[in-house]
Image (spheres, helix red, strand yellow):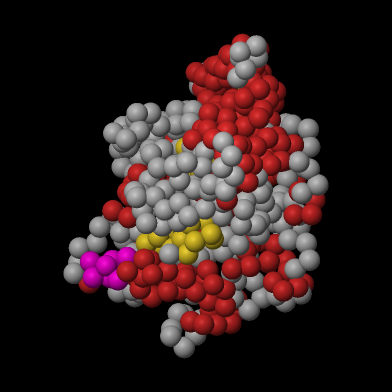
Amino acid sequence: MNVLRLSIAEVSRALREGQLSPTELCRKCLNRIKRTRHLNAYITVTEEAAMKQAEEAEMRLQNGTPKGPLDGIPFAVKDNFCTENILTTCASKMLGGYVPPFNATVVQKLLDQGAVLVGKTNLDEFAMGAGSTDGAFGPVRNPWSDAETYRQHGGPEAQTDWVITGGSSGGSAAAVASLSSFFSLGSDTGGSTRNPGALCGLVAVKPTYGLLSRHGLIPLVNSMDVPGIMARTARDAATVLGILQGQDMLDATTIPSLPGQPDLPEDFDIKQITVGIPQEYHAPGLSPEVLGQWCRVAGLFEEAGVQVKPVSLPHTQFSIVCYHVLCCCEVASNMARFDGLEYGHRSPVASSTEALYAATRHEGFNHVVRRRILSGNYFLLKQNYERYFVKAQQVRRLIADDFSKVFGSGVDVLLTPTTLSDAASYRDFMQEDNRTRSAQEDVFTQPANMAGLPAVTLPTALSSRGLPIGLQLIGRPLQDRKLLAVAHWMEQRLGFPHIRFHGDHQEQETTSTTEEREEGTTAVGA
């Protein structure tokens, strides 16, 4: 058994019972990061700090005073969350050398629980993208493409056409999927955790807006950004959500914690819910395989006695256009702070203040960020403000009203696709421009952000290419735990497979003599 495949509950039990020490576990995760560096999942690996945190967790466990279920558990954080004394880049030249003096609230909550931070993960620059291909540190590779490579060729060196992770939290997804961390934090503005979660075979949670603090999350779109959670199971995600939720005096948009126990109920009665199938999500370009899984899971619900009924969200067709207008407007506002004067990159051009601003921003931002800033400033011009920004806000209200009407009719959960297909190859994905790719990849996910609703994606099966296919559940506001309970019910019946790479059959129980061989074989698990 490879301990890196265990769930949070299983590895926590092993740590408490002395079957494994936090330092051993941390070392295994750090070795895994080294062995899977070709995935480019991490920007910064915090090896020294992680080992120190693991040693402190080990002392607590030996003294019988663990801080909680995450004590000694390694995790990773997307590199747009501030981390005290640790480089934070947003995968951009603009933030080169920036080391925050504080932790984001969600990061601090995890550290307060004894979780061990092993590194900061790669992303699209400032979280603007749908493939984790547009960051300053290069693209992230999907660990599942390695599975096929190992089967056919025997190693990552033989890769010729790997597949993307999705974005923008692709590094966080690759970290969990490649077993170098037990869970990770991403950010979700229009699907940036759910999209890579689906393409990498993970459970990915976008909480109700305001349930998790955004303090210390470098903003993209303040009115839609939420910290997201990536894990291998719904129960793992629920454990992390229970720790992260709650009001934060440093974020005025936060709301109190959900009532009740953070863990999922053992006796959840699936027959008590009603599942809605939104007809507008049968979108152009939806692959037959994703459609087949959508129908299959709807059938599983019906066989279990759940009422499944078609519903309509009529303004969905306008959602992606509305999202891009509002996104660009808030990007233009948020990116204005990066001027080269206070922190980050500064151009040597000094002929005038205006020239310094222009040169710094041209050098520091990539073409994707610059294009969104220009678009947002255009939408916000006095002569365009009513036509674009105000109109988009009005359509956003209609989109939210559609969800309210459906949930008001007795529907508890919406079942939808997460992505149009399985993961695209890097070669095919890069043939489209960033805006087109984002519109295609976020079509099913961004409406939940527009309405502030909780949503979760989970893997259902493998495609004919051997890549994960995920489906999405969208719930009522503050019904995050019920949503995860439904996802857990689905998990138990879908039997999503574990992919084992070439050489995994040689793995044994972890010992000092087999550790190097074990960590040298790359693996992906759901």
Compared with 60, 100 (above or below) is: above
| Residue at position x 71%, y 41% in the image | 434
- The reply, left or right, for residue 336 in relation to residue 211 is right
Residue lying at the far front in this picture: please name it: 351
Q: Nearer the viewer, residue 426 or 525?
A: 426
Compared with 427, 390 (above or below) is: above
Compared with 361, 391 (above or below) is: above
Q: Position of residue 326 (x, y in %)?
A: 59, 25
Q: Locate the C terminus by quadrant.
A: bottom right
Q: Position of residue 162 (x, y in %)?
A: 73, 61
Q: Position of residue 336 (x, y in %)?
A: 53, 33
Q: How many marks?
A: 0
- The reply, left or right, for residue 108 in relation to residue 413 is left
Q: Main secondary structure of the magenta part?
A: helix
Q: Nearer the viewer, residue 521 or 170?
A: 170
| Residue at position x 60%, y 62% in the image | 40
Q: Is residue 468 magenta?
A: no
| Residue at position x 52%, y 56% in the image | 121
Q: Is residue 57 magenta?
A: yes
Q: Nearer the viewer, residue 404 or 327?
A: 327
Residue lying at the far bottom in this picture: please name it: 513
Q: Position of residue 129 (x, y in %)?
A: 64, 43
Q: Nearer the viewer, residue 103 or 70?
A: 103
| Residue at position x 51%, y 42% in the image | 340
Q: Is residue 83 visible?
A: yes
**Which segment is the magenta one?**
53-61
Q: Is residue 487 visible?
A: no
- On the image, which quarter does residue 208 sit in? top left
- On the image, which quarter does residue 505 sit in? bottom right
